[in-house]
Image (spheres, rainbow, N blue to C red):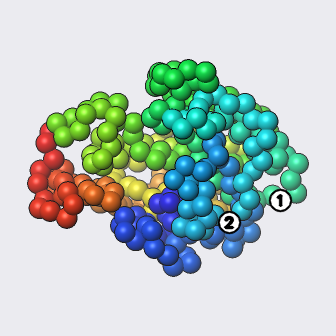
Amino acid sequence: MRLLRASCGQLSHTNLYQPSGADCYLFENLAKLGFNQQLMLGHNGLFGDFLKELRSLGGMQSPLMDQTGLPVSLQAFDGSPVYEDLAVLNRWLKTEEASSNPRNATFYNTLPLHDGNHFPGQSKTADYKVRAQKLFDDLDNFFTELEKSGRKVMVVVVPEHGGALKGDKMQVSGLRDIPSPSITNVPTAVKFFGMKAPHEGAPIIIDQPSSYLAVSELVVRALDGKMFSEDSVNWQQYVANLPQSAAVSENANAIVIQYQGKPYVQLNGGSWVPYPQ
């Protein structure tokens, strides 16, 4: 939901479940600029009314891309299918190649790394490292096909949260009741395809405190498409002066902030206390 409302930055947890101004919805804004809106899921979207909330709270009204016949690589904790990412992404690419709409904005949500996922026919949670490697392999293979296609594409990968593979002094591993820095300080990746002058060398690292508003700004700066056809791209200018966001992580019961370089936590509206390090 936060990503879909990225145009207005990071909302409080309470406001996340309230209507926002029309200008807050990232994909609605892109649709107004002529981008055909598409929705893909690597699952059925039923748990927690996820698909319904995408529509009611995220402004995502486009029909869900057909999932018929997609291979099932995992099953979620409730037994529902988790589709293979490479198959889903390749179906999108084939759909795009047959489409007459030159401008497209696609939202894809996938959950192969979620807790409780297991291989079909097994009850034990699938090894995280194996699933992570499979996800990266699928993305790498898809990127290869995307490069071959010649399409001009900006790919943005935004994690929902960390997996809490290691515990700390307040939470054991696997728990995410408190949105601690190790869970919510996660990397976002941006990659361009089909450029006349692609970026070379080491990745550009944005190390300022950044969040959804910075992601939205990077999308806005690439909207006119000029950087795809330029003989030389000023990458430092592209990432300069991005909007910064203070480190605030929040759910229904807890808020974690950074104050004078140290994390503090508030539980259920109580007093602020240092987060144990």
The structure residue drawn at horizontal position 61% and vertical position 21%, both measured from the top left corner, is 121
Q: Secondary structure at mark 2?
A: loop
Please identify the quarter of the rendering in which residue 59 is found.
bottom right
Q: Are marks 1 and 2 in contact (CB under 8 Å)?
A: no
| Residue 4 visible, this orientation | yes
The quarter of the picture where the C terminus appears is top left
Q: How many marks?
A: 2
**Residue 254 sits above or below residue 88 on the image:** below
Q: Nearer the viewer, residue 204 or 78?
A: 78
Q: Position of residue 240 (x, y in %)?
A: 44, 57
Q: Which residue is mark 1?
A: 101
Answer left or right for 179 relative to 113: left
Q: Nearer the viewer, residue 104 or 2?
A: 2
Q: Position of residue 56 (x, y in %)?
A: 58, 68
Q: Nearer the viewer, residue 37 or 203?
A: 37
Q: Secondary structure at mark 1?
A: loop
The structure residue drawn at horizontal position 64% and vertical position 36%, both measured from the top left corner, is 81
How far apart, in angstroms, are the residues tagged by discs 1 and 2? 18 Å
Please identify the quarter of the rendering in which residue 49 is found.
bottom right
**Residue 216 sits above or below residue 74 on the image:** below
Answer left or right for 106 relative to 8: right
Q: Which residue is mark 2?
A: 61
Which amino acid type is shown beneath numbered disc 2? Gln
Instruction: Sort mark 2 into few (<14), some (14-19) or many (20+) by Cα contacts within 10 Å.
Output: some
The structure residue drawn at horizontal position 33% and vertical position 43%, both measured from the top left corner, is 176
Which amino acid type is shown beneath numbered disc 1? Asn
Q: Position of residue 264 (x, y in %)?
A: 17, 53
| Residue 217 visible, this orientation | no
